[in-house]
Image: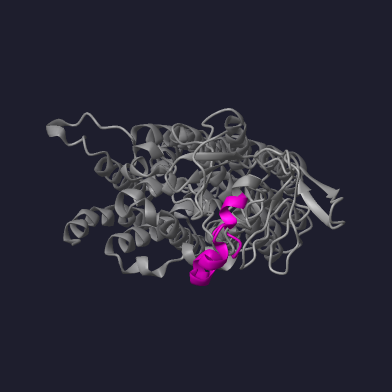
Amino acid sequence: MTGAPVSSGGGKLVPVAPDGGWGWIVVIGSFFVHVFADGFVYSFGVLVEELIKEFHSSNTMSSLIISLLTGLTLGSGPLASAICNKYGCRTTTIVGSGISFVGCLAAYFATQMWHIVISVGVIMGMGFGLMYCPAIVIVTMYFEHKRSLATGIAVAGAGVGTVLFSPINTYLIREFGWRSVFLAFLLVLVLCAICGATFAPLEFVLIGEDGEEVEEVKETELVEKKENEETGERAELLAPPKYTPKAQSQSSGINEAGKIRSASSHLSVNLESQSRSRAGTVGERDSGYLNRKDVFYTGSIHNVAEFREDPHKYRSTGSLHNRHGTVGSVAAVSVAKLDDVREGSQEDSQALDVSESTNTEGKNMWKTINNMLSLDLLLDPTFLIFAISNLLTSVGFNSPLYFLPLHASQIGLEKKQGSSVLGAFGVANTLGRVVFGVIADHQLPLPFGLGKDTARNRLWMYNISLAICGILTVFTYKFQTFIQLTIYSASFGFSIASYVCLTSVILVDLLGLDKLTNAFGLLLLCQGIGTVFGPPISGYFADYSGTYDLSFIFCGINLFISGVMLFLIPYFQKKKP
């Protein structure tokens, strides 16, 4: 592939989004990660009654399991993102599956409730956090034009998992006891690791400063050693093409993993006499995917004006400007291009901004976390309102699912019916994610032209859906039959889908694409905090009253407030200078 040469100033590394091909395999892998992980979380309520009986536990104590499990899954988002940024989506997912496997195995041998709290809540929560982030990120990396459809399919796995595992868990408990559920999920977590293995790293394109495509960079990691006959020095070579870097006191070498380590001075690369400039190799490590401004955007990115104006600015995962730390994360760009990049690097390196350059491709995990937790955003009233809304939504989101089977049992329904109630949530939630994902990017046929503003439409849909969830949940105590509970569960599942699908899209509408990563990191932290505190408080109300009525009322009030308060956002937007 040819194009404009790279100037001595450098260029940008841009991953190629195929919008298809292997990308659909990645979507399937992400879909099943959601099926297995979210299915375990959302169907966990089926297991709770057995655990309470087995260990003579209170609702408050047992609710710590789900609060820590979901809270750590979300709250560890910035940490998981930093790990994903450095080691790649595939490695992060597989490691997360392994950690979850350890926690699930420990839960099988539990003899007290606090054993379950630690093994499932803490260990599996951290493991799920490492699985959740890359399952989203990898889909957005592989798709641009079809991103809304691809992410919609992937996250729909959560609803499918609820439908699938609620009756399966009920059957396993009835036939083999509650420990068999954890035994079965050991196999499921192995499947999660296999799904993560499909998250292959992308090919990159080197974009020059003028925006022209220069060179394609493949991620095949083909490395071999060759003895330099002329100098007798051992060199590490990349093939194709084969070349010999001369070792100098401050020059950078190429290690066996195919990763170039850049030093503070210039890079010296000699090409063999008849080799041609070809693509090198790029490993998964130091991918810098989180440097992409649109990495958490789950909608159709080409509908965003900022992206259309300067797409390479938001696609770029790193630059090849002449400063130390910038080449190191790329296993090997074209050798000839690196030779161009080295020109003048020694002079430019004197004026580099160290804090920026040392994290260009995500090598410094702490800087990645720090960037995702930009506290300056809390001074923005618009974001602060949205963050508080997210926290309240998280307080009320998980507890209804957790207590629904217990509530069903308390009003006299059979366990099978209780699992069916959760299944209704799963079906409706899957449908809701698809519906909200599709209509969010389109104008609505409303009178007086009210539906032409798509950004306003999304915000209103989001607000109204949360308010409806709150009202329905407050009056759950009125639903005393299987049909009534099923209707509530399905309505709740459909409405709450907007919370999952539209959060990142609305963030961009409110703050712009440049601030998405920073804002999303803070939101994950807020969601984690809300999720940790919500279920135990709901459990306390259940223990205090002897029923789950107060628990549902508490959750419903939080959901209702979280939706209604967002109608204040247009007022603060108008006050912005």
Kindly identify the residue that appears in the image at 41 percent across and 60 percent down: 391
**Residue 565 in the figure: left or right of residue 245:** left
Kindly identify the residue that appears in the image at 61 percent across and 54 percent down: 84
Please give the count of numbered marks on the rendered protein. Answer: 0
In terms of depth relative to the viewer, which is nearer, 238 or 395?
238
Residue 44 showing in the rendered view = no
Q: Is residue 199 magenta?
A: no
**Residue 292 in the figure: left or right of residue 449:** right
Q: Is residue 520 above or below residue 421?
A: below
Where is residue 143 shown, x and y percent of the image? 50, 36
Q: Quadrant of the C terminus?
A: bottom left
Residue 452 showing in the rendered view = yes
Determine the image quadrant of residue 250. Answer: bottom right
Q: Quadrant of the N terminus?
A: top right
Q: Is residue 109 above or below residue 404?
A: below
- The magenta span reads 338-364
Kindly identify the residue that appears in the image at 69 percent across and 50 percent down: 91
Where is residue 327 shown, x and y percent of the image? 60, 56
Q: Is residue 339 magenta?
A: yes
Kindly identify the residue that appears in the image at 28 percent across and 54 percent down: 566
Colour convention: one colour
Determine the image quadrant of residue 27. Answer: top right
**Residue 454 in the figure: left or right of residue 241:** left
Where is residue 123 shown, x and y percent of the image? 68, 60
In terms of depth relative to the viewer, which is nearer, 269 or 415?
269
**Residue 464 in the figure: left or right of residue 48:** left
Where is residue 549 shown, x and y percent of the image? 42, 55
Q: Is residue 310 above or below residue 382?
A: above
In terms of depth relative to the viewer, which is nearer, 297 or 315?
315
Check the image and name the residue furthest to the left.
448
